[in-house]
Image: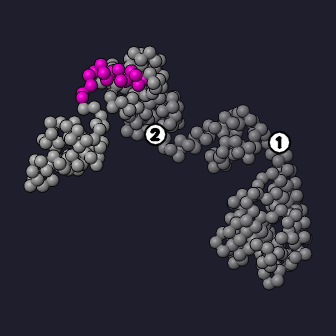
Amino acid sequence: MRNSYSLEEKREIIIAYIKNNPKATHKDIRRKLKLNPNRYFKSLEEAFKLAGVELPRTFKKKTRDEKRRIIIDYIKKHPKIGSQIIAKETKINPSNIFESIEEAFKLAGIPYPRTIDKRDREEKIREIIRLVKENPLITIPEIINKTKTQPYHFFKNIEEIYNEAGINPINGRKKWKLKKQQEIISYIKKNPLSTQREINRNCKTHIQLIFNRGIFEAYERAEIHFPYERLKLYGIGIKSIRDRAKTFEEEIAIKLSGYGKVNRLVKTKRGFADIILERKNKKIIIEIKDYQEKEISISQIRQLNKYLEDCNYNLGFLICKKKPKRDSFLIGKNTIFILEETELNKIPKLMDGSVV
């Protein structure tokens, strides 16, 4: 604000600002107008009255007893409130008026809804170090949950906690792997006849990546005899699955031969395509999956797309027993459809462009 303004002009400027900003404070006026209201009025209250604006708050300083009464009344109306919200809503800090927030609730005749943490700093530090010594694989969220305190208030990082506990630090990836190993070992102890697939599904992992020797090492670490006799039966089961899948492929190939020339197990740059069907000078790739329970996954879609890229074709089909909810994919210039064995008649129509 330029010094050329007279005293009266500056008063008028402040009054005009208050009219346009009825919730203005000393700080607002000084920041926006570069004028101190106390130099031109007896008080900010006087400026508000001259502006004809209702006072946004009382300018009268409350006594200690008045502040206590305001907080007590607020607690009675909001019995589950916390001290931070009390301070925000009443503009009074309870810790300046009461010995503790617990005292305020007591005077209000309301049971305090929280447990007061009476542990000192050293107690919390000792508790954190004890937990890490007992379980070096414990994570920061687990420490917070068990101690109800934030470790980073007392330590710079997890490495410092390990050092204080006299334990060599374990990085995040290694810690995750060790915890997964413990989880798998525990699962095997409870389920001693578990298959690799069952372990992977229930522990949400790949056991062959967690242990150097896969499932055999996991059973060994669990001190459980590996059921080799089941492995023999499993091998017989695998052979029957392969035979069934082969039969299914042959049946589909025979049916497809009615629509065009069928070439089976065609080598591409990145594998073998089950079938390449040639019809009216057009070629497509067809993959066949004899899954009984397992659904078609995105990995099978991507594999078929790789074959299409290798052969420079742009239309592919995946034939299965039961197709998923999403049965068509557009990947770049390539289109892939998933069909059930009963829908083979759609292939020539889609190849000829008569079905969209």
Establish if 287 lies above or below 46: below
- Where's residue 26, x and y in %? 22, 41
**Residue 223 position by quadrant:** top right
Q: Are marks 1 and 2 in contact (CB under 8 Å)?
A: no
Query: Which residue lies under the disc numbered 2?
Result: 169
Q: Residue at (85%, 66%) from the top-left corner?
A: 343
Looking at the image, residue 17 sits to the left or right of residue 106; the answer is: left
Q: Main secondary structure of the magenta part?
A: helix
Can I make out residue 246 in this image? no
Task: Give how far across and how far down residue 162 sits, in percent.
Answer: 44, 35
Q: Is residue 147 left or right of residue 327?
A: left
Q: Amino acid at mark 1?
A: Glu
* The one of 280 and 67 positioned closer to us in this rendering: 67
- Residue at 33% of width from left, 28% of height from top? 93
- Tag 2 secondary structure: loop
> In the image as oriented, which residue stretches furthest toward the bottom?
281
User: Which badge, 1 or 2, is on the more N-terminal residue?
Assistant: 2
Q: Residue at x 90, y 66 (%)?
A: 251
Residue 302 at x, y = what percent? 68, 65
Using the rendered image of the protein, determine whether residue 287 is visible from the camera's viewpoint: yes
Region rendered in magenta: 60-75
As displayed, is residue 180 above or below residue 353? Answer: above
Question: Quick check: 21 left or right of 227?
Answer: left
User: Given the image, on which type of amino acid does mark 2 rest?
Assistant: Pro
Front disc: 1 or 2: 2
- Is residue 289 placed above or below 188 in the rendered structure? below
Q: Which residue is mark 1?
A: 229
